[in-house]
Image (spheres, rainbow, N blue to C red):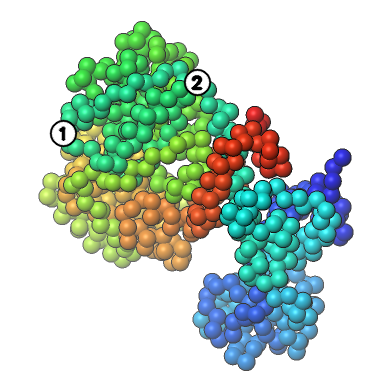
Amino acid sequence: MPGAMDTPVQFLKGVGPRRGELYHKLGIDTIRQLLWHFPRSYVSFGDCIEIAALEGDQICSIRAVVVRKSGEQRIRKGLSVFKVTAADDTGEITLVFYNTKYTVDALAVGEEYFFYGRIGGSAFRREMNTPQVFSLGEAEKGTLSPVYPLTAGLTSRMIAANASQALELAAGELNDFLPGEIRLKYQLCELEFALCQIHRPKDMPSAEIAKRRLIFDEFLILALALSKIRGKHSVEAGYQMKCIDSAPFYQSLPFFPTGAQKRAVDQACRDMGRNIPMNRLVQGDVGSGKTLVAAACCWTVWKNGYQSAMMAPTEILAMQHLNTLRRQLEPFGMRVEALTASMPAAAKRNVRQRLAAGEIDLLVGTHAILSDGVAFQSLALVVTDEQHRFGVAQRVALAQKGNQPHVLVMSATPIPRTLALMVYGDLDLSVIDELPPGRQPVLTYRIGSDKRERAYGFIRKHLDEGLQGYVVCPLIEQGEADMGLKPAAQYARELAEGPFAGYRVGLLHGRMKQADKDKVMEDFKNGELQLLVSTTVIEVGVDVPNAVIMMVENAERFGMSQLHQLRGRVGRGSQQSFCILLSDARNPESRQRLGMMCKTNNGFEIAEFDLKLRGPGDFLGYRQHGLPQLAIADLAKDVGLLENAQQAARDILASDPEMKEHQKLREQVERIMRNVGEQIN
């Protein structure tokens, strides 16, 4: 029989069906879900800031007297604005309310209140938009008031009142699912205390104690769920590799691998020697040499007598990999071939026949490898490059071409280690954190459009020295040309006829036919083109060591990770390279992001900064899989607790693999696994 925790939230006093629908928008349907909907911050009535000391964009509380109220201003149908002037001993501030006549009517001129919100306006006339309002009497009841994630129609005050009622109803059912020895080892409070203090904190230290426990819970349950999912999918490998000494492969190279590259190869080869399939992510910054790791693994598989496949997201990248791998592997006698959608039908047919007969040792290609007619004789290793561009289903589809083959995933998109653990939860992780010797950091500068002509002159200087460069412009959506943003073709024409007249200028964009793209890239690689005007189609994998300078138009329109990938197209030789970020953006966050790009070439530092700035959801831009959003944990800040929780998960599963002695905790894990369509073993 369902208990109080599973009671629909609409049955709480003052909720009802209409407010219940608003709660549903927040993913809250039951009392349990309401109790696990945590405040994101607290209004502190003890830490008010004087009006004269307020700074733009800060979120804070002020204590002020209402001086005057303006009448209703109708901006448009359905939108009314009310302005209230409040003052303290140091100055005045304008409080702006939208469509909340009842709130403004309740404010009495001459009365003192607490107001909480974000500061805007100018340095001379401060404003606070849609502030929360607290009477002095409410403030005296407690020094902290919770601020929740909201949807239109719900206020933090409503949620706090409903959460208090829910706590009273569920009091008898808040059984702690965390074993006492784990609470003791990691110094965590009990669950009932945590839930009470997160929603109704006595003071800030109590709220922090509660938060620490709930963050640990979130990481622990997720770590256990991921372990169970991985264990469930751990079948016996179709091909168990014998250990092969990689020295002959390394000695054949014109350079010596970095320690990080050798470490990644050793980890992968050790995985392939086990009786369960390897699932390993090799993550390295732009130009760190991930392809060499893949080549070494393919060489090991070939020495064991089996086939490998490598899948890349674009034909340009696939053909680049083909050339690199042929150079490194064919001297040993390995047979390396390509399969792409643009190949003639007869050539495709020939490759498919030889592949099925075992006459090809390594097949390199695009998603064409996944087509029905492609069959391997003994596919033992699957390598996918730039995993974020493939869905999990595509990775699985390629693996199904063989009998439980080993899987190696490569990514140059820098993802902080903590986030990689969540995104690639089913993969082991190798990080290549060294650049090959001889590479110089790319010098990066941000300039405004007033310095455009100087930038053109700087680019021309390098072209005159026999070097090459890129000009990158953002993809233009319909209607954006009116905003002064030019499509790439128009921009390339203007450059070729204007500041770069007399230079060989090429154009590359995503809507061109594949054959035309290949021709442009071939001409650029061979030096027949000096300047390449391109959209982000060059973001991944294009390798032209003679290209040493890049200018990015409207740089604020690109994400930090994307800018870092683009910048990685220069600096691939021994010459000093440059990246010019052209932007007139005034937005503080955009300026902050571009400033960080100028400070460092380290993709992982950039990724950590981006994660802190935007949070994990926006950082990824999409959901990789159905694992739940984190309700309270912060991957950028809570790394220590994540590591503690993962160790606790390992300890629990080592002593109790089926979690029979941890039934309450098992129920929490089962709840998550049901949400992602999995069942616990």
| Residue lying at 21% horizontally and 51% vertically, measured from the top left | 440
| Residue lying at 31% horizontally and 10% vertically, measured from the top left | 359
Residue depth check, mark 2 versus mark 1: number of the one nearer the observer: 2
Q: Position of residue 639 (x, y in %)?
A: 50, 54
Does the image show residue 147?
yes
- What is the crowding at mark 1: few (fewer than 14 residues within 10 Å), some, or many (at least 20)? few
Q: Quadrant of the C terminus?
A: top right
Comes first in the chain, label 2 or label 1: 2
Left or right placement of residue 468 versus residue 311 in this view: left
Write down the residue under mark 1: 254
Q: Amino acid at mark 1?
A: Pro
Work out how far the residue at label 2 is from the one at label 1, CA to CA, in angstroms. 38 Å
Tell me: residue 41, above or below residue 428.
below
For this orientation, the residue located farthest to the bottom is 89
The local secondary structure at tag 1 comes to loop
| Residue lying at 17% horizontally and 36% vertically, measured from the top left | 255
Q: Position of residue 541 (x, y in %)?
A: 32, 38
Res 651 → quadrant:
top right
Left or right placement of residue 330 versus residue 368 in this view: left
Q: Amino acid at mark 2?
A: Glu
Q: Quadrant of the N terminus?
A: top right
Question: Which circle marks residue 59 in the picture?
Answer: none
Res 224 → quadrant:
top right
Tell me: residue 98, above or below residue 545.
below
Write down the residue under mark 2: 236
Q: Position of residue 205 (x, y in %)?
A: 63, 69
